[in-house]
Image (tube, rainbow, N blue to C red):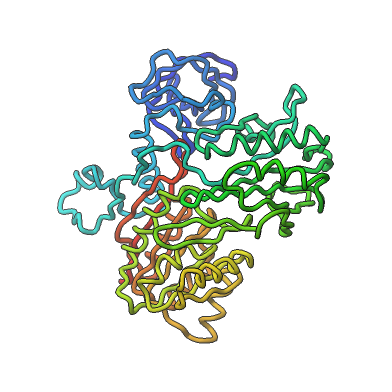
Amino acid sequence: MNKNEIVTVTIEDMSAEGEGIGKADGFPLFIKDTVMGDVALVKVIKVKKTFGFGRLMEILTPSPDRVEAPCPIARACGGCQLQSLSYEKQLEFKQKKVWNNLKRIGGLPVYMADNVPRDLGAAQGSDLRKMIPVYPTIGMENPWRYRNKAQLPVGYDREGRLVAGFYAGRTHCIVAQEDCLIANERNKDILDRVLSFMKDYRIEPYSEETGQGLVRHILIRVGYHTGEVMVCLVINGRSLPRGEELVKRLLALPGMTSICLNVNRERTNVILGKEIINLYGEGYIRDRIGDVTFRISPRSFFQVNPIQTEKLYTKALEYAGLTGEETVWDLYCGIGTISLFLARNAKNVRGVEIVPEAIADARNNAEANGITNAQFYVGKAEEVLPAIYEKERCRADVIVVDPPRKGCDAALLETIVKMEPKRVVYVSCDSATLARDLRWLGEHGYETKCVQPVDMFGQGVHCEVCVKIERV
């Protein structure tokens, strides 16, 4: 196989990142923008020893599962890798992705619950009760317009126009997109007003190359249930010229509750800095999950899909098996979303989170909802929990973990095992690191009982997973 060769490929599988996989003369190629079942004309753009990468030139025969992507910049943006795959097949893709990671990385005896476990079917005398079901992905009724948060970089496009949008895949080139189809409809009016304001007063966007310019990102949050709106400009400075004029323009929009600046003067790709300067409002909006109301500030972690979040947390509550007598630890608790969701069914809940503002929100959220049996600690979960355990020798009946993509730290897992909870509920946004941690827990006295994928990111490849784990 040679670079720049044009080949015809039948797509036989899909990678974890949503690329189609097919073979040309027996040589595997990964091809973005194709789906399983496509027959495609492909240009080979990179060749390695055992595989290569191709660029889609033309769909010769579309897959029966292919749909017309409604977004006009779907290929250029790359944020919705599965837009051309029917939603039913997207859910199947995510279930299989979770199953594959748990089996391949974790070495777990998993099977897709709606299928006969093929590798066991041929094994005589296999005990199916020892197998771990990966259930069908819980999907959405409407996998569009679900995101309650947007973070859009600001800059100039190739024609020199001021734009906001998204970085094209694997680049830092901004693709203009002011009306993303998975984002809230209100975003377009907000972006129009912010960009018009910048043009009118000649306020420059930030340049990553030079480190000059003022406005880096526009952060928008919309309360799904409350309709409250937050706009936060991430700036390379501590003030915004004519900021009162921007406030005036934004307040003309319904639901505008908080307008603020976030100061980030570092040469970094981290979006948010630590300092918040309020221009209007109290610096937060409110929204609900179930019957619990949450206060959300610019740096708070709050799941981006409120409808699916309630389904995810309901599953976590089910797996926790609470009777009202349990002590629960919620690690990586954010603003207390899972903690307060569980608190009304537990004796007490203790949450840990590294972001001080999030813990302040968690405490305020507990007070606002009349929840008195929840305590919150600031710090790294992998440091706070071992320190408290060493000091108090405390136990837990249930531990809930919802870590970032890197998964749980080794010191944290060791402390969890020392505390001997009856159950662990693991909420994961990355089934690869989940698989690693489940393997470790399995080697230290804990048994994975069942796995439930939940689609929080329709049209994209990511998937949340809720896992029930019990002490042997």
Residue sitting nearer the eye, 218 or 188: 188
Residue sitting at x 36%, y 23%: 37
Quick check: 277 left or right of 464?
right
Image quadrant where residue 132 sits: bottom left
Residue 288 percent across, percent down from the top left: 46, 57
From the viewer's perspective, is residue 23 above or below residue 466?
above
From the viewer's perspective, is residue 333 above or below residue 451?
below
Q: Is residue 432 visible?
A: no
Residue sitting nearer the eye, 181 or 80: 181
Residue sitting nearer the eye, 266 or 418: 266
Quick check: 66 left or right of 147?
left
Residue sitting at x 69%, y 36%: 193
User: Furthest residue to the left?
Assistant: 125
Q: Is residue 24 visible?
A: yes
From the viewer's perspective, is residue 53 above or below residue 39?
below
Residue sitting at x 57%, y 32%: 179
Residue 17 percent across, percent down from the top left: 49, 37
Marks counted in the figure total: 0
Q: Can you say which quadrant of the picture contains the C terminus?
A: bottom left
Quick check: 272 left or right of 8?
right
User: Furthest residue to the bottom?
Assistant: 392
